[in-house]
C-alpha cells in the first residue's frame, strides 16, 4: 500500500538539484524513526518503478538545533559511476552506462538552449560535477 505522505515528499525531492535537501521536522526521536522507516519502505516501492530515480535520493535522519529531522538529500554523484582500484593503487573510473549516449543527449540539450538547471531535471542521473565543469564552466 502506498504511503501518500512519503510518496509526495519523495517526489518533491526528485525536483531538487544535486546537493539540495528537504528537512522534515519531527516531534520526537520516536516519530523520526517511524517516519524514516515509512520513507525507506516507500523508496523501496518507487525503486521497483524507477530504480535510478529512487537511488538518487538519500533518506537520512539528524538532530539539529534541538529538533529531530528527517532529511531527503538529492545525491551529488551517480551510483552508475565508480572507480576500480588496480593492484598498483591507481584508480580507474568505470561506468555502468554508455557515456557516449549520455554525452550526445547533454550536447543536444545544450544546443537546444536548455540551461544547466533544466538539463539537470531532465537527465537521469543528474549531472556530475565533472560534467558541470566540462559543459558549463
Image (cartoon, rainbow, N blue to C red):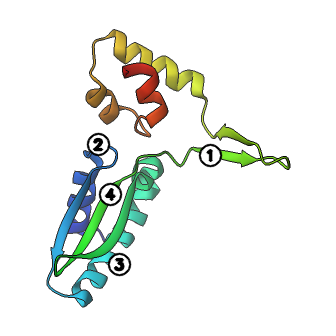
Secondary structure beneath dot 3 equals helix
The reply to whether callout 1 and callout 4 are in contact (CB within 8 Å) is: no
Q: What percent of the width, then of the height, locates residue 31?
A: 22, 85
Residue under numbered circle 2: 17
Q: Quadrant of the N terminus?
A: bottom left
Q: Residue at x 41, y 34 (%)?
A: 127
Give the CA distance from mark 1 to mark 4. 20 Å
Q: Residues within 10 Å of mark 2 (few under 14, many from 20)?
A: some
Secondary structure beneath dot 4 equals strand
Residue under numbered circle 4: 73
Whether 114 is drawn above or below 129: the answer is: above
Q: Residues within 10 Å of mark 1 (few under 14, many from 20)?
A: some
Q: Residue at x 27, y 12 (%)?
A: 113
Q: Residue at x 36, y 17 (%)?
A: 109
Q: Earlier in the sequence, mark 1 or mark 4?
A: 4
- Residue 22, disc: none
Q: Quadrant of the C terminus?
A: top left
Q: Earlier in the sequence, mark 2 or mark 4?
A: 2
Q: What percent of the width, then of the height, locates residue 63?
A: 25, 78
Residue under numbered circle 1: 82
- Residue 37, disc: 3
Amino acid at each position: 500500500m502506498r504511503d501518500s505522505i512519503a510518496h509526495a515528499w519523495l517526489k518533491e525531492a526528485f525536483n531538487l538539484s544535486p546537493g539540495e535537501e528537504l528537512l522534515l521536522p519531527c516531534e520526537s526521536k520516536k516519530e523520526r524513526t517511524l517516519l524514516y522507516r515509512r520513507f525507506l519502505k516507500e523508496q523501496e516501492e518507487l525503486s521497483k518503478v524507477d530504480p535510478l530515480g529512487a537511488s538518487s535520493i538519500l533518506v537520512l535522519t539528524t538532530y539539529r538545533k534541538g529538533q529531530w529531522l528527517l532529511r531527503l538529500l538529492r545525491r551529488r554523484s551517480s551510483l552508475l559511476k565508480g572507480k576500480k582500484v588496480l593492484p598498483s593503487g591507481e584508480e580507474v573510473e568505470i561506468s555502468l552506462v554508455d557515456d557516449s549516449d549520455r554525452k550526445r543527449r547533454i550536447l543536444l540539450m545544450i544546443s537546444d538552449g536548455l540551461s544547466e538547471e533544466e538539463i539537470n531535471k531532465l537527465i537521469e542521473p543528474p549531472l556530475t560535477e565533472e560534467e558541470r565543469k566540462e559543459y558549463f564552466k
